[in-house]
């Protein structure tokens, strides 16, 4: 049987530290009661402000800049898109390795892709498998057969306005906004205009803003 050792309390004690961190977390959940957002509670523990803080700061910056140099009105990341050679495999991978919540696959014939959304508390990943080899994503997979990060998508309040501003900001939009499978307009920026990253600009749903 384990006996009490004098001085044990001063030693590093992982179990005590763990209990302590659990206690701190519980205290925090208590301070952010009932309808509170668990994510915001954990962010607060890490010294990260709630999402509303970033939205307010963003709005302040938008109001401060003069009209001719106004940046696009981007307040959030809508999704990150990853091209995969086998969607079923990818879904299984995200579920079994990361315990992720993955939605049912959806075909988007207009973009020749089949996608599944991996939902996290603060963001989502779109897994995309091409439906045709000579589609945009098909060609990307030909260059990256194992799959890879394809684009990131920013949410904006007004896609038409963002599109109108994109040219003067030398963001090289790849065609005017078109309707996404969710019914909201979106367009892409040339990767060469953004340090090698393909960026999608999508009009956000009301609740995302
Ligand atoms: Co996308």
Image (cartoon, helix red, strand yellow):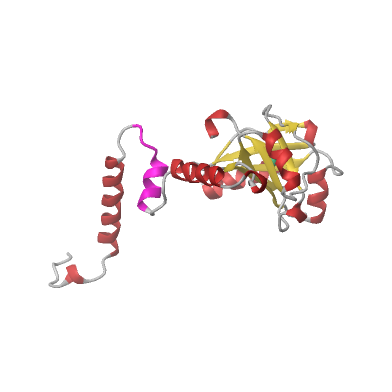
Magenta-highlighted residues: 35-45
Quarter of the figure with residue 62: top right
Residue at 73% x, 57% y is 196
Q: Quadrant of the C terminus?
A: top right
Residue at 84% x, 40% y is 132
Q: Quadrant of the N terminus?
A: bottom left
Q: Is residue 105 magenta?
A: no
- In percent of width and height, residue 130 lies at 78, 41
In the picture shown, does residue 146 fall above or below 34?
Answer: below
- Count of numbered marks: 0
Residue positioned most to the right: 134
Closest to the observer, 83 or 110: 110
Name the side, left or right, on which 18 lies relative to 70: left
Magenta highlight: main SS: helix
Res 91 visible: no
Closest to the observer, 186 or 129: 186
- In percent of width and height, residue 98 lies at 53, 48
Q: Is residue 40 magenta?
A: yes
Name the side, left or right, on which 106 lies relative to 36: right
Res 174 visible: yes
In the picture shown, does residue 184 fall above or below 27?
Answer: above
Q: Where is ligand 1, by quadrant?
A: top right
Residue at 65% x, 49% y is 69
- In percent of width and height, residue 134 lies at 87, 44
- In percent of width and height, residue 106 lies at 69, 31
Residue at 30% x, 57% y is 18
């Amino acid at each position: 049987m384990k006996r009490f050792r004098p001085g044990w309390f001063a030693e590093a004690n992982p179990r005590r530290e763990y209990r302590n961190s659990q206690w701190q977390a519980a205290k925090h959940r208590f301070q952010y009661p009932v309808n509170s957002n668990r994510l915001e509670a954990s962010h607060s523990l890490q010294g990260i402000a709630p999402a509303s803080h970033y939205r307010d700061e963003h709005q302040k910056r938008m109001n401060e800049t003069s009209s001719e140099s106004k940046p696009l009105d981007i307040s959030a990341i809508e999704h990150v898109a990853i091209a995969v050679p086998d969607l079923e495999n990818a879904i299984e991978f995200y579920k079994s390795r990361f315990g992720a919540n993955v939605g049912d696959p959806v075909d988007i014939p207009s973009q020749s892709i089949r996608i599944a959304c991996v939902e996290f508390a603060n963001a989502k990943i779109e897994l995309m498998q091409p439906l045709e080899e000579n589609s945009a994503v098909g060609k990307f997979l030909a260059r990256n057969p194992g799959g890879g990060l394809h684009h990131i998508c920013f949410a904006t309040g007004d896609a038409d306005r963002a599109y109108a501003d994109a040219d003067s900001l030398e963001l090289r939009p790849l065609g005017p906004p078109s309707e996404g499978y969710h019914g909201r307009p979106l367009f892409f920026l040339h990767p060469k205009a953004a340090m090698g990253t393909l960026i999608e600009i999508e009009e956000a749903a009301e609740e995302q803003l």
